[in-house]
Image (cartoon, rainbow, N blue to C red):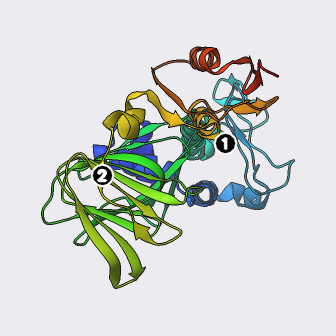
Amino acid sequence: MKKDIIYRYLNGECSNAEVEEVLLWMRSVELEGQLGEMIEQDLTEKLVENKNNQGELDHLLPKIYNSSGNIELEASGRPEDRIVPCKETGNVLRGRPFRTLKWAASVILIAIFSFIVYTVIQKDIIKGVQTKVVAHQITKINGFGRKSTIFLKDGTVVYLDSDSKITYPLVFSGGVRQVTLTGEAYFDVAHDESKPFIVKAGSVNIKVLGTEFNVRAFYESDEVKVSLDGGQVEVSNEICKTGYSEKLFLSPGQSVIFNIENGNFDNVRAFNPIEDCGWKDGIIFFNKANFKTVINKLEKWYNVRIDVVNSPSSVWSYSGKFKDQNLDNVLRSIGFSQGFSYKIENEEVFIKFKNQ
């Protein structure tokens, strides 16, 4: 990253492309090292410009603060070696010449930028969304209880479910647009006949030109399910780098499940759009679900841990639909029909069945 782009970013003078470049760099693994190099270079250049202070090069303070102490940037050096902006007295800073502040001016700009970087990264952490940029590949990771919408450069929109991860290039190049998915996502793919869009989910490839479909491929599951809303998709499973063992096509309203254990596809069949795709619209849907399925979905959806004090006396076959409901409302409804009481404490839920 060039320093002049950072300065333009701080002054609000960047182009849209440069702003995106800076934001991606903020989340890259190269950020920390490059910032350190910039600061060291700035300090060295400013000190060399003033020959009278050449001797201070090896003893320059490793911490730079603003006057309120809100910004602190660590660097290498001895604890006693430091520059601290002090109150002004005319053109002189108490304890140091005014030129000290001049030397540190560009460094303080980068320190301010570091604070901005920290703030941006913290926003992602608070939202429960991790973003990594490595070798022009972007990875988005949603934790439990978090969903996100991703806008790709080709116009494709991806709705990423909780407990899911997607990796895609910063810019699609070559003859295909390829992404890798673990978990669940709904794709609204921008049409481009010259560049097929491919989703890799484990050993399954989903290839389209432009359409809407849902892919469910959680790492702990023994299946990958593809459900097509519109257009057409080609679904295949890999046997090697150069070929496929099986290939099939889906039409709108059809879905197919790939069984990871036996390496085969089940029969193509119709699917319920609310059951397979309703999650992206805030809908929790259960269709004759067993107890474990209900508990697992609620834990992921609301980012809670559910502890069951005892066990249900009968086998569950629960059906229900909730849209934009909080956990308390959902548990109250399910508990009424299934005969359990519950208690919510912070991020933990305790369930106790009334028949025991």
| Residue identifier under label 2 | 269
The quarter in which the C terminus is drawn is top right
Image position of 183 with respect to 240: above or below:
above
Task: Tell me if 196 is positioned left or right of 114 in this view.
Answer: left
Question: Disc 1 versus disc 2: distance between alpha carbons?
Answer: 74 Å
Residues 61 and 323: in front is 323
Q: Nearer the viewer's eye, disc 1 or disc 2?
A: 2
Which image quadrant for residue 207? bottom left
Dot 1: what SS? helix
Residues 352 and 113: in front is 352
What amino acid type is highlighted by mark number 2? Arg
Query: Can I make out residue 346 in this image?
Result: yes
Query: Can I make out residue 115 in this image?
Result: no
* Residue drawn 15% across the image and 58% down it: 192
Which image quadrant for residue 105? top right
> 10 Å neighbourhood of mark 1: few (<14), some, or many (≥20)?
some
**Residue that extends furthest to the left in the rendered view of this protein:** 193
N-terminal of the pair, mark 1 or mark 2, is 1
What amino acid type is highlighted by mark number 1? Thr
* Residue drawn 61% across the image and 33% down it: 316
| Residue identifier under label 1 | 100
